Amino acid sequence: MKASDLFVKCLETEGVTRIFGVPGEENADFMISLAESEQIEFVLTRHEQGAAFMAEVHGRLTGEPGVCLGTLGPGATNLITGVADSNMDRSPMVVLTGQADSKRQHKESHQAMDVVAMFRPVTKWAHAILHPDNIPEVVRKGFKLASEEKPGACHIELAEDIAEMNAETSPIPAARVRRAVPDDKVVDRAFELIRGAQRPIILAGNGTVRKRASEQLRSLVEKTGIGVVSTFMAKGCVDMDSDQCLYTVGLQSKDHATCAIDAADVVICLGYDMVEYHPRLWNAESNHKLIHIDFLEAEVDEHYRVDVEIVGDLAHTLWMLNERFDALDAAPAYDLKFQAAARREMKADLEEHADDDAVGAIKPQKALFDARDLMGPEDILLSDVGAHKMWVARHYQCHEPNTCLIPNGFCSMGFALPGAISAAMIHPDRRILAVCGDAGFLMNVQEMETARRYGTNITVMVWEDGGYGLIKWKQENQFGRHTELDFGNPDFMQLAESFGWFGIYEEKSSNLRDSLERCFQHEGPSLLVIPVDYRENGLLTERLGNIACPI
């Protein structure tokens, strides 16, 4: 069998159904082999970075590795930002690149560079296929490592001459590996610490949005009444309507949820990645008892001195705790009034501008209130990176896991538009909304053509302020002024028309809900542009600075 044919057969064996990318000369054999596959669709994108973000969202929403492809040299370098984003945000991905003929890799040669070395710092594993008969092992290893906890990106390189060779091996079947579970003794220690606490609280991280983990977490909080504060990436691990939902932390300021953490004596950290919200921001005095429950051991940090550490399958660990609470005659009598107060205060903040009727610029709070009101529990919002991300993180809450996707580890701009295309391909029956700043939207604007070509039903809401708003916000907070950060924008309605999108420019707050609904109802991609009132950024900073916790 030709090596490139075997490679495609291995991908089919892994269950791959879609590959995003931009091919080149050095992976031509692979592409011709892929064209013969009845299982795998190749999604041709307009830039490799867009392809990587699409693969990342595929991995987040399905739990199976998303696959993206580029050629050698600039194709590989264009992929790397999306690959790094996927890896740091724990999304399973396999990235495929071509490479120069192995007979010219040792010397100065057209577009040739050490792609594997470049990918190693931003992947779990990166390797070149050095012999055609190794293809099944390399592909199986790449997918296995990408999928295992914690998920991430793996890179496989196939040189053009090796792709042309004959191979004598066959695909290795994919096999599910059952994750290790903790022993009873350490779970007993955690249970006793939680049962004996007066004001325990749960800090839920990225790991809790896995389906089984979320189900067990919801069961635990129903039994105990313990409140849950989630990171940006754990939204929906408990329903926003649950009394135990204490909303989100992640802004580097005091907020109602951090008041609830301040009041706690025991903090139970579940599936928590330190990159999401550093413990110096919520445990600066190291005055909390900490329980770390995750698939991996805790990172060593001055402000994260763990009292009980449970390493193993998160869902199973939560099940073990649930079994112990079920065995009690009565649930512990915790003092949760601080948590109830935090939920009450934050809920009031979320609803404050629901009826705003400003004209000329729309408040972030109003835009997100209307979006939440129009979107169902299973619908998906994707946030790009910028000032709007801070508002999405605080003001857009969720009913279900993985219904608000925010880049928060590597934190790359340009994520939301291509990510929305992928989300719509996976869930064509759901409403898909990408919220972007004007800067981030234009970073991958070329994927508007991809969205139109594939007829994806997505809505992109662009918050227009004509500048790098988040950088302004941060510079003003730190220095009282900001550097030159303004830029010009195209006529967004002409842009939408030129790409064949439906477009609305809406500057009246009272009309926003209807305009957004019109976009959702349109068959095909829609662009909704709003002038955003970022005067609210400074007002929020001032407001958070004046929050006085009750203890």
Image (tube, rainbow, N blue to C red):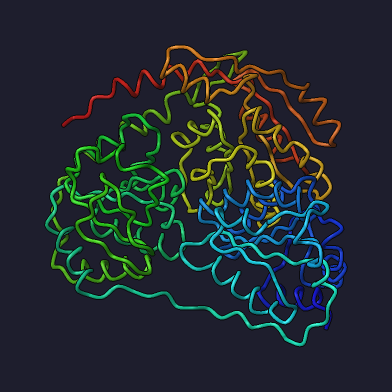
* x, y percent for residue 279: 31, 43
At 26% across and 45% down in the image, what residue appears?
Answer: 302
Nearer-the-camera pick, 328 or 117: 117
Above or below — where is 77 with respect to 149?
Answer: above
For residue 291, which quarter of the picture? bottom left
Q: Nearer the viewer, residue 153 or 362?
A: 153
Q: Is residue 135 above or below residue 296?
A: below
Tell me residue 485's x, y (percent): 60, 18
Is residue 327 toward the left or the right of residue 282 in the image? left
Estimate the x, y position of residue 212 in percent, counting from the top left: 43, 66
Q: Tell me: residue 545, above or below residue 377.
A: above
Viewport quadrant of the C terminus: top left
For residue 398, side relative to residue 22 (left or right): left
Q: Position of residue 343 (x, y in %)?
A: 31, 38
- In the depicted structure, whether residue 42 falls above or below residue 547: below
Q: Report the side of 160 relative to 178 (left or right).
A: right
Name the residue located 62 percent from the left edge and 57 percent from the top edge.
Answer: 117
Q: Seen in the image, is 479 located left or right of residue 308?
A: right
Residue 136: quadrant of the picture: bottom right
The residue under the point 74% across, 56% down is 20
* Residue that protrudes farthest toward the front in the picture: 107
Q: Residue at x 72, y 54 (%)?
A: 113
Q: Nearer the viewer, residue 302 or 503?
A: 302
Number of numbered discs = 0
Where, quadrant-wise, is the N terminus in this rendering? Answer: bottom right
